Amino acid sequence: EPTIPATFKDPLAVLNDVFGYAAFRGEQEDVVRHVTEGGDAVVLFPTGAGKSLCYQIPALCRRGVGIVVSPLIALMRDQVEALRQAGVQAAALNSSLSREESYQVRRDLMDGKLDLLYVAPERVATAGFQNLIADADIALFAIDEAHCVSQWGHDFRPEYRDLNQLAELFPGIPRVALTATADAVTRADIIERLGLGEARVFATSFDRPNISYTIVERDNARQQLLACLARHKGESGIVYCLSRAKVEDTAEWLDGQGIRALPYHAGLDAGVRSANQDAFLKEDGLCLVATVAFGMGIDKPDVRYIAHLDIPSSVEAYYQETGRAGRDGLPSEAWMSYGMADVVQRRRMIQEGNAPDTVKRVELGKLNALLGICETVDCRRKAILAHFGEAHPGHCGNCDTCLSPVESFDGTEAAIKAMAAVYRTGQMFGAGHIVDVLTGKVTEKVKRFGHDNQPVFGAGKDMDAKTWQSVLRQLTAAGLIAIDHNAHGALTLSEDARAVFRKERTVTLRRDRPRKTTKQLRAQK
Ligand code: ADP
Ligand code: ZN
């Protein structure tokens, strides 16, 4: 009896014939060939790079069905729909199916009729599902949004933890984990949690050179937003707000300003929501005002601007949300206004949530990392990419700090004080305690560890606690201080810190600008 080879189609032919694309993009081809040949892969490509084809094509090239773990039902539905239109036998198993529909999918799977099957992570670990696929020919497992497996990621989903069983239950079946957002700690965690230590890691640059970044301190949010939107007359874009109420208020107000705007949030009637989404996708020049409930899986190439009226929860979230702009490669703008009020609100949301303390600390650390990028005097692009472990020379010429340098001062002395406080206390404490030490605040903790006897104690009395917090965030954003999530968010010094202590490197810090300039104050009189 002749053996059927595991691989029987050519990836390029599938790309041409099934998906109608002429050529692979960037590293797509390497991933596709590696997985088609049976290798495991970790794919770290930014949004819009074309991650889906990295598992869809190998699934079609290999014998059997490709099982895709995906966290959102809406996302699954869109993918399945698109695949079916391309003539691929795709289906999804999730809680939105009727009994009959679900039965049909199982039947098709058992009959070997499916090319791709999308499932929710919580289903994969069930005995029912494992029995179902036990006798099926499986081409591969794809784990989409793989950062959900890590509690250091920005969207931890405990169900993802069970996916570590796949390697043991289905040895020899290739597994590919994909994500667009993972900092270095999260990446390492994904690899460990999913048992992908032997997998090949594919990572492309996270830089989105066609997106310009602007972050302004809130002054008059609505006027600032109008000024931003004035640069985008007749273009499509998204305005993100933290709360549903603010979404509705903002949409209504923009409409009154002659800008066609529609609201989108999870509290709206499903009919209204999908109508507004459709309008955004099909019409030109619509402004969609939304909470973060909008955007995942949306593939609109010509989104020209993303405006944040409130600070997002993390650099990853900011990167993901702004990444929805300019998928067509044309110039686009990522604009944000932030103020201490929304930072305080975010902090409260984290503190009052029911997550365990370890997770709360990570979330606070993530918010601080983004705040560090808001406060940096350095190139925004450089700071964002540094967060993802990617070096960039800076001076991108396409961000606000590059185009109009912010007021700054030589902060080398302050940096040395702050880093000395971190070092002298053993690199074991979080930012709050370090600030207490610097400002000479006698707390119970300070006394317990004898830090009031350290020479650095009170060495930073010349500046207030808020300023020191900002200094620590800026040093973190500059990569001089690192946050150790495995040690309760303790601040540690990076290799680069040494050069600052030796005065081989200077540190520039943002000058804390007064709320109003003296000129404005004079005009008020
Ligand atoms: P990601 O999941 O990385 O955000 P997608 O898989 O959704 O990206 O792909 C983004 C867009 O790029 C989709 O419209 C997809 O059809 C398109 N695309 C992907 N690969 C190619 C290619 N090789 N040639 C042309 N278009 C592609
Ligand atoms: Zn720049």
Image: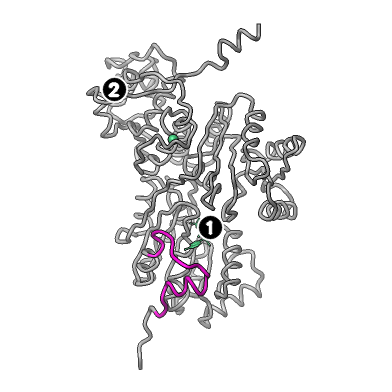
Three-letter code, disc 1? Pro
Image disc number at residue 396: none
For this orientation, the residue located farthest to the right is: 256
Is residue 359 rendered to the left or right of residue 348? left
Residue at 52%, 70% (x, y): give it.
19
Taking depth in this image into account, of 263 and 283 the one nearest to the observer is 283
Quadrant position of residue 304 = top right
Toward the bottom, the furthest residue is: 1
Q: Percent x, y for residue 135?
A: 45, 79
How is the structure coloured here? one colour
User: Badge 2 local density, few (<14 within 10 Å), some, or many (20+)?
Assistant: many
Percent from the top left, x then y, of residue 38?
35, 71
Foreground residue among 307 and 231: 231
Residue 406: give x, y in percent of width and height: 46, 24
Q: Is 13 within the magenta? A: yes
Residue under the point 60% across and 48% down: 303
Residue underneath mark 2? 420
Question: Disc 1 or 2, which lies upstream in sequence?
Answer: 1
Identify residue type, mark 2: Ala
Task: Tell me if mark 1 has few (under 14), some (14-19) or many (20+) residues whose alpha carbon lies within 10 angstroms of its own.
Answer: many
- Whether residue 484 appears in magenta in the rendering, the answer is no
Relative to 278, say whether 138 is above or below.
below
Q: Is residue 518 above or below residue 34?
A: above
Circle 1/circle 2 CB separation < 8 Å:
no
Would you say 262 lies left or right of 458 here?
A: right
Helix, strand or loop for disc 1 = loop
Position of 18 with respect to 439 (left or right) is right
The residues colored magenta run 8-29
- Where's residue 354, x and y in %? 54, 41
